[in-house]
């Protein structure tokens, strides 16, 4: 099994070499790393050090000698079995990260200096450090059953359609018994998956929920406020319900400069609309012109408002090059007073500006 794994690494590294030579037309470096960045996710102080390994192959014709490995933090240590790599030989650098009492995101640098490259190849280890709190009860004060969380909702942030997003959420098991997920009673929608780390969280200790959100499976765009439910096992089942806040955007690959005039482009006549002083008894309507100023058809994927008091009418969602249409919105300010801001968000296939927001301001008497 170990030989199979090494063979796969050689194959993957060889493919990377071929691509690099073809793409850049330059002689490749003798040292070819399987990866140069390791993502550790969320790590907890009480679980001790976290280890990762960087595999490398010598693609040159001469031996490569590792002369020095430097780290930028005392919290990272390194180890390697051999300091000399012959032609086609695979080696590895093992990196251990020791969580500290300082919380937050971290990105640690490891520089591998060799006789071929004295300036060194740079590797990175990154993740999110979660220190152990001084007072567990107050730190994890939002309870869902016997699990304690820091916040009443989980903000997944922006999720794009090119790949699922995973967020690690720490919690505290206040039970006197260990817990695990009940895989048979997850009751989750298709676009959400939940895993527990570790798989069994001991009594009176912390764990992580790895929450994966798949925007493609959700098949929608915009802001979503969802409740997800699952069961945990611990001498009987216990139902847990969490609130997720997510904003989904369609992903578009970067546009080459040579192609910038060969794409759909959506122009909006006004993105900052000031209705000035209006009465709470007066319903206001206004039209905004949408124009396709690109050379390819524009498709309006979706239009959403952030209030039921704001509705819109859009005759068509498809605009040919040069074509225009009116987006007409109607605002009912009933029951509102003072300075007011509403938003209309337009999602389209314009790769440069796929999400556009129109702000509607007013002063309501």
Image: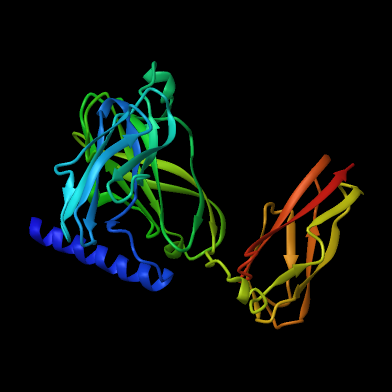
Report x, y in % for residue 140.
Answer: 41, 26
**Residue shown at the point (48%, 63%) measured from the top left:** 161
Q: Is residue 83 visible?
A: yes
- Colouring of the image: rainbow
Of residues 233 and 224, the one nearer the viewer is: 224
Report x, y in % for residue 70.
Answer: 32, 35
Q: Is residue 315 left or right of residue 6?
A: right
Of residues 117 and 338, the one nearer the viewer is: 117
Of residues 185 and 254, the one nearer the viewer is: 254
Report x, y in % for residue 27.
Answer: 35, 66
Quadrant containing the N terminus is bottom left
Of residues 344 and 235, the one nearer the viewer is: 344
Q: Is residue 215 left or right of residue 297?
A: left
**Residue shown at the point (88%, 53%) measured from the top left:** 282
Q: Quadrant location of residue 98?
A: top left
Q: Where 114 sits versus 329, above or below?
A: above
Q: Is residue 52 visible?
A: no
Q: Where 32 sits versus 244, above or below?
A: below
């Amino acid at each position: 099994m170990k030989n199979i794994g090494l063979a796969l690494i050689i194959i993957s590294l060889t493919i990377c070499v071929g691509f690099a030579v073809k793409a850049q037309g330059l002689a490749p470096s003798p040292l070819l790393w399987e990866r140069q960045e390791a993502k550790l996710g969320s790590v907890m102080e009480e679980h001790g050090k976290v280890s990762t390994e960087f595999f490398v192959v010598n693609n040159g014709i001469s031996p490569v000698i590792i002369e020095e490995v430097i780290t930028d933090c005392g919290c990272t240590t390194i180890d390697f079995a051999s300091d000399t790599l012959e032609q086609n030989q695979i080696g590895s650098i093992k990196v251990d990260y020791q969580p500290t009492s300082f919380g937050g995101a971290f990105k640690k640098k490891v520089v591998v200096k060799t006789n071929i490259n004295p300036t060194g190849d740079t590797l990175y280890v990154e993740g999110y450090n979660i220190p152990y709190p001084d007072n567990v009860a107050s730190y994890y004060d939002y309870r869902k059953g016997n699990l304690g969380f820091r916040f009443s909702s989980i903000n997944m942030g922006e999720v794009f359609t090119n790949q699922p997003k995973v967020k690690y959420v720490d919690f505290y098991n206040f039970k006197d018994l260990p817990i695990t997920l009940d895989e048979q009673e997850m009751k989750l929608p298709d676009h959400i998956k939940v895993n527990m780390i570790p798989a069994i969280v001991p009594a009176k200790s912390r764990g992580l929920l790895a929450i994966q959100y798949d925007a493609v499976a959700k098949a929608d765009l915009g802001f979503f406020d969802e409740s997800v439910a699952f069961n945990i096992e611990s001498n009987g089942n216990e139902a847990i319900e969490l609130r997720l806040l997510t904003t989904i955007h369609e992903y578009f690959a970067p546009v080459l400069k040579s192609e910038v005039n060969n794409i759909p482009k959506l122009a909006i006549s006004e993105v900052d609309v000031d209705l000035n002083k209006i009465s709470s008894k007066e319903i206001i309507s206004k039209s905004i012109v949408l124009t396709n100023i690109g050379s390819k058809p524009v498709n309006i994927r979706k239009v959403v408002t952030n209030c039921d008091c704001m509705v819109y009418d859009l005759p068509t969602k498809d605009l040919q090059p040069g074509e225009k249409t009116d987006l007409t919105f109607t605002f009912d300010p009933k029951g509102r007073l003072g300075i007011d801001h509403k938003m209309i968000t337009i999602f389209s296939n314009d790769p440069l500006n796929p999400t556009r927001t129109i702000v509607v301001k007013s002063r309501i008497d």
